[in-house]
Amino acid sequence: MTATPEFDTLTVGEVVADTSVHLTRDALVRYAGASGDFNPIHYRDDVAASVGLPGVLAHGMLTMGLAVQPVIDWLGDPGRMVDYGVRFTRPVVVDPADGATVTVVAKVGQLDGEARTARIDLTASSNDATVLGRAQVRVSLA
Amino acid sequence: MGREKIREFARAVFASHPTFLDPEAAREAGYADVVAPPTFAVVVQEQTLAQLLGEPDAGIDFSRVVHGEQRFAYSRPIVAGDELRATLTVTSLKSLGGNAMVTAESTIVDASDAHVVTATSTLVIRGDDA
């Protein structure tokens, strides 16, 4: 098991984790089944087109769910994550053949020395555009 | 909360930390069983939201609903074997240029009524002209 990051060695702006996830249509179907969100805009091109979307979209909650994983791996214990919030700013369009790649970079955004908590800011992007806004994870390193 | 449901969800969100997948690793880390990934609470919250959106009186057309924001505030992670109860409160209703914005908060507690997580969703309901 990974050791807990040392609060005192962290600096604001430091990159603590980064990752890239390749999403395919089957990943969307798998998430639909696991989460119970069977909105057809996440797997049917005809339905996505009929409501004016540029294509089949990844579930926002799938993007949110995968974006926090590198932070958990860095923390070494999911219990140290106390708060996680995002805004869904831009959808991730998943091409039927090529899929889509979501890149996540996690940086220290703020440190609270008294509470020994850190705010980790996530930048999630796909096709060079950010897809989550104000994606922030608060972690306890007490 | 069933162990296999949690593991299925963990694989679907590309979770690799062993506490999400391996009961032995979870026990070594001090948990009774596998831990649910942070966003798993949405599966519990979804059931309360479905009740709200399904209310005939609510008059909400599901195809016009867009997820705007989501937040989870945890007291402790969800662990397989937990018996959870969720209570949904609509905390804010706003009208914005033909669209409606609903903020709904689900407070999730365990069998001993101790707080586990609060999940807050902001939904945008697009108006006819939007």
Image (tube, rainbow, N blue to C red):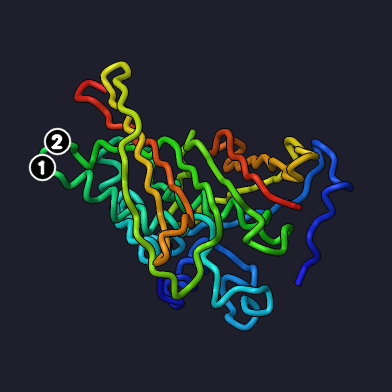
Q: Residue furthest front?
A: B112
Percent position of residue B96, x then y? 32, 18
Chain under numbered label 1: B
**Residue located 52% across and 47% down the image:** B73
Task: Kindly identify which residue carries mark 2.
Answer: B59
Query: Could you tell whether A44 is left or right of A133 in the image?
Result: left
Residue A83 appears in the figure: yes
Choose top left, top right, bottom left or bottom right for residue B14.
bottom right
Percent position of residue B28, x then y? 68, 79
Task: Kindly identify which residue carries mark 1.
Answer: B56
Amino acid beneath label 2: Gly
Residue A29 appears in the figure: no
Circle 2 residues within 10 Å: few <14, some 14–19, many ≥20: few
- Whether B69 is drawn above or below B114: the answer is above
Instruction: Kindly check if marks 1 and 2 are in contact, taking CB atoms under 8 A apart as contact.
Output: yes
**Residue located 75% across and 72% down the image:** A1
Amino acid beneath label 1: Pro
Query: Could you tell whether A87 is left or right of B99 in the image?
Result: right
